[in-house]
Image: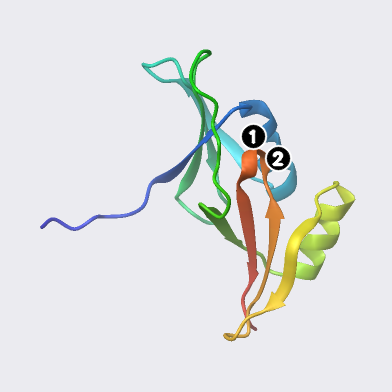
Amino acid sequence: MPNVKKLLHTRLRVNDLERTVKFYQDALGLTVARRSISPRGAQIVFLATPNSEEEIEICQMPPGAPPVEVQPDLMHLAFEVGDLTAFTAAAAKKGFQLSDGPTLTGSGSTIAFIDAPEGYEIELIEHAK
């Protein structure tokens, strides 16, 4: 069996593309790498993640498509932060509150969660120093 070379991107379907892109820009500091329209007419935005080649693809299907309904605890994206306390304070100033945590893990890392639009969840991880 051939080996996979690397992860390129993760796709999230959403109902409100611009609201979701704004959240990832404002709350996490991600940047828009490119925008496109798929052959099926879906609007697509790829977000660049700092210090990583992997991207996040945000996709809004064309009008008339069934609405996206994210099941609770279906998935989350995890991001490493250097200082969770400082990140939390900066996010709070922008109106983004933690939905869970901070929690010290058995490995010595500290984790917390913040809710993204559409029912997705973001995990923030500060690794033990």
As helix, strand or loop, the secondary structure at mark 1 comes to helix
Figure check: 16 above or below 51: above
Figure check: 27 above or below 18: below
Q: Is residue 85 left or right of residue 75?
A: right
Figure check: 110 above or below 120: below
The residue sitting at the left extreme is 1
Position of residue 129 measured from the top left corner of the image (x, y, whole percent): 65, 84
Position of residue 80 measured from the top left corner of the image (x, y, whole percent): 60, 64
Q: Quadrant of the N terminus?
A: bottom left
Q: Are marks 2 and 1 in contact (CB under 8 Å)?
A: yes
- Which residue was labeled with disc 2? 23
Question: What's the colour scheme?
Answer: rainbow
- Which residue was labeled with disc 1? 21
Report the residue at 65% width, 35% height from top: 20
Q: Amino acid at mark 1?
A: Val
Question: Which numbered dot is residue 91?
Answer: none
Task: Tell me the crowding category of disc 1: few under 14, some 14 to 19, or many 20 or more residues within 10 angstroms, Cα based.
Answer: some
Task: Tell me the crowding category of disc 2: few under 14, some 14 to 19, or many 20 or more residues within 10 angstroms, Cα based.
Answer: some
The residue sitting at the right extreme is 93
Q: How many marks?
A: 2
Position of residue 39 measured from the top left corner of the image (x, y, whole percent): 36, 16
Report the residue at 51% width, 52% height from top: 74
Q: Amino acid at mark 2?
A: Phe
Give me the C-alpha separation between circle 2 and circle 1: 5 Å
